Image: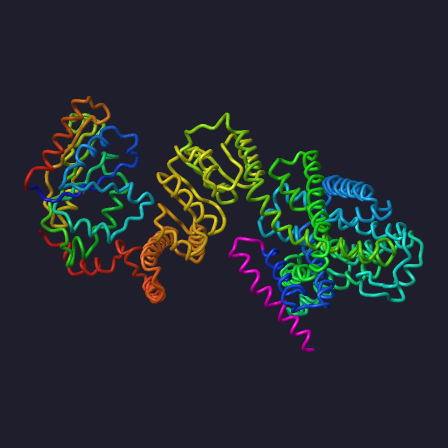
Amino acid sequence: MADNTLILFAHPALEKSMANRALVEGVSDLDNVRVHDLYEMYPDFHIDVEAEQALLSDHDRIVWHHPFYWYSTPAILKEWFDQVLQFGWAYGDGGNALSGKIAKSVVTTGGAADAYTPEGYNRYSMQEFLRPIEQTASLCGMVYDSPLVFHQALNWTDDDRQKAIDAYRAWLLEPR
Amino acid sequence: MSPIFLNAFVYLLCAVIAVPVAKRLGLSSVLGYLVAGMAIGQYGLGLVGEEGESVMHFAEFGVVMMLFLIGLELQPSLLWRMRFPILGLGGGQVALTTGAIFGAGLALGLDWQVALATGLALALSSTAIVLQSLQEKGLTGTTGGKSAFSVLLFQDIAVIPILATFPLLATLAPAASDDHGHGGGSAFQDWLSHQPGWVNTLLVLGAVVAIIVAGRFIARPALRMVAKTRVREAFVALALLLVVGIALLMNSLGVSAALGTFLAGVVLADSEYRHELEADIEPFKGLLLGVFFISVGASIDFALIASQPSLVAGIVFGLIILKAVVLFVLGAVWKLKLDQRFLFAFSLAQGSEFAFVLFGFGVAEGVFSIELSQVLIASIALSMALTPLVMIFDEKVVRKRFGTKESIDRESDVVDEGAPVILAGVGRFGNFVARALRSQGIEATVIDNDSDHIDMLRNIGMKAFYGDATRHDLLESAGADHARLLIIALDGEENINQLIETARKHFPHLQIITRAMSMSHHLELIENKVDFAVHQNSASALEIAENAMTRLGLRAHKANRSIKAFARRERERAQSLAAIRSDETVFMNTVRQHIDEMERQFKLDHQNQSKEADKAWETEPIRKSVASGEFSRKR
C-alpha cells in the first residue's frame, strides 16, 4: 500500500480546463489520495492556516498540482506557501513539521516540451523554472521528487489524456 | 380614586392577556381586544358596567392620535397625488353605499329621512379597526390597502357635512338629552347650534386654515424651542398638547377631531421633528386604541341582541355583504386586481366608530328613535367585532381560492420547468439575490405576496408569482418539482420556518438556503440542518467594521483579513452553539464562554498576535534567526 498523498490542486477556472479536470477526475477515486481543491475551498483567498497545517501533518506525500502560469503557480498556491509554511512550523527554529515527507510538482503547460530548452522560446528547462518550489520543499526538510510535467495540455488527443492519467496514477500507486 | 385604578387595572390586564393569546393563535390583536372586551363587559364577567361607554369616548382619542400619525407619514405632495382615489373611491363608496342602504330602508318601510340618515351613518367604515388590521398584516403598502386608506380618509372628511345634514332630516321632536358624544354643551356650542348652517361651515373652514397656518408658523418654532431644552418629557408634553388642543378646537365646532389632527400631521410631515413626534405619540395611540377596541367589545348589548336575534343578525350580515359588494364593484371599476379587490372589499365592510357619534347626535336631533338607534349601534359594534374574522376569511379562504388563481392562470401558458431556483420573497433583500443570480444568467422563479413587486418583475421578463410562498400548491406551480434550490428571503421567523417545513414535506429534494432574522433564529436553522443559513445583517455589519478599521488607519488588507478571520470564528461559534442549543444551561454557559473567548481574542488582536490573521508575516522571530546567523551558514 502506497502512502497517503495530499494533492494540493490549484486552478482558478477549472470549468474551462479540459486537461486538469481529466487529471483530477482520473485520480480522485484512489483510496490513498485526497484531492484538496484550493480555489474551491478558499474562493476569497482567506486560507485557513490551522486546517491546512493539520492536513499536511496527516499525509506523507504532498503534491502541488497546477497549470503553469507565467513560469510559476497560480496566485492562490503562492498565497498558500506564504501563509501555511510558517517560520517555526515548517522551517526555522523548531520548524520541522514537514521534515521527511515527499513533495512533488504536477504541472501542465500549454507549450510543447521543446519550448523548455535553451533553444526554445522559453529558454529554460522546467526543472530550472521549478527551482523555487524545489528549494521551498528542501528548506522545509522535504524530499522533492522529480516533477511530473504534461506539455501541450491545451491540445491533447484522447490518447494523450489517457497516457497522462495513467502516468499520474502510476506514481500515486507506487509504493515509497 | 379607586374605581379609576380598578378600571385601569382591568383594561390593562385585558390588553396584556388578550394580545399575546391572539398572537399565539395567529390572530390579529384587534380581535383579541374585542373578545377581551366582550369577556369583561356587562354580559360577560361584568367587570365594567355603565362607565364602559364613557371609557369608549375617552379611548376614541386613540383614533384621533392614529390619524395624526398617519398625517405625519403623508407629505402634502403625496396627499395631493392621492386626490383621485380619495375623491373617486371614497366619494363613490359613500354615495353608493348610502344609496343602497337608503333603498333598503325605504323597502323596509322607513321614512325617507330616517332611511337616508341611516344610510349616511352606516356608509362609514371603522378607521381604527381597518388601519390597525392592515398595519398588523403588513398590507398598508398594497394597492388594496392604499385604496382602503383613501376611502377612510374621504369618510373622515364626509362626517362634517353628514353632521350638518342631520338636523334637516329630523322627523321626531328633538330628544331632551344633549349627548352629542362631544364633551357636553358649553355656552359656545349652545350659541353655535342656533346659528345658520353657513356660519358653521365658515367656522370649520376657518379652523382648518388656522390649523394649517398655526402648524407652519407656531407649532414648528415651538417644537424647535422645546427640543432645544433637551428635556424629553417637555417635548412629549408639547406633542400631546398639540393633538389635544386640535381635538378640543374641532370638537367645539362639532366636527371630527380626527380630521383636524390628521391635517396637523400632514402640515408637520415634512418638518424635522416628524420622527420624534411619531415616536412620542405612538405608545399613547397604541394603548388608547387598545382600550377603544376593548370598550367596543364591552359595549355590545347582548341582551338587546338576544331579544331580537334575527333582526340584528339580518342587519349585521346584510350590512357586511352590502358594503362588501359595493366596494367590490367599485374596486372593479377602479381596475384593482382580483386579490387586492377582495382585500379592499372585505376590510372596509363594517360600521364605524363615527356612527356611534352620529346615532347619538341623530337621537338628540330627533332623527332616529331610541329603539332604532340602539339596534343599529349594537349591529355596528358586532360588525366591527366581526371584521378581523372577515379578514381572516378573506385571507385564508377567498384569496386562496381566487386571488392567486388569477395570477397562476395568467402565467400558466408560460410556466416552464427549467428554472433551477425558486426565490421566496423579493423585497429589498430578495431583490439583491435575484439580480446577483441574474448576472450569471441564473434564472429564479419568484414568489412574493405584493402584486406590485410581481408586476415590476414580470415587466422585466422574470417569472413571478403572486401569493403566499408557504403554500405548497403555489410552490408546485412555481416549479418546485424541478427546481434544485429554494432561496428564502421572506421576512419574519415564523414565515421562514413554515416555508422550510412545507418545502421539506412536499419537496424533499430541494436544497434550502435561507436568511436568519436573528442570532437565535440562525442557531435554530443550523440545528434544523437547512443547507445554508446566514444572519440577515452579518454581511453589512462586517463591511461597516472593515470600513471603520481602514478609516482608523489600518491597512486595507490587514482590515480585510481580520474581518474574514472574525467571520470564520463566528461561523464556527454558531455551529458549536447550535449543537448544544436545546440544553438551556449548557447553552448559557457556553455563550458565556464564547464571550470570554471573544474577549481574549480582542486582547490578542490588540497585541497584534492574531495567529490566523497575520502570523505568516510576523518578522520578529525571523529577524532573530537571521541575527543568530542561521540563514547565512552553509548547509
B186 and B429: which is toward the camera? B186
Magenta segment includes A44: no
- Quadrant location of residue B378? bottom right
Locate residue A64: give its quadrant. top left
Which span is picked out in magenta? B1-28
Determine the residue positioned at 73% across, 60% down. B220
Disc count in the image? 0
Is residue B39 visible to the viewer in this orientation of the structure?
yes
Q: Position of residue B191 (x, y in %)?
A: 92, 62
Residue at the location (43% across, 48% down)?
Answer: B515
Residue B267 is left or right of residue B518, and the answer is right
Q: Is residue B285 above or below residue B495?
A: below
Residue at the extreme bottom: B1
Q: Nearer the viewer, residue B353 or B79?
A: B353
> Residue B19 magenta-drawn?
yes
In the picture, measured across the screen, residue B488 lies left or right of residue B105, that is left
Where residue B284 sits: x, y (%)?
65, 63
Quarter of the image for the N terminus of chain B: give it: bottom right
Secondary structure mostly seen in the magenta stretch: helix
Name above or below for residue A23 compared with residue B543: above
**Would you say B481 lies left or right of B188 here?**
left
User: Which is more toward the observer, A85 or B110?
Assistant: B110
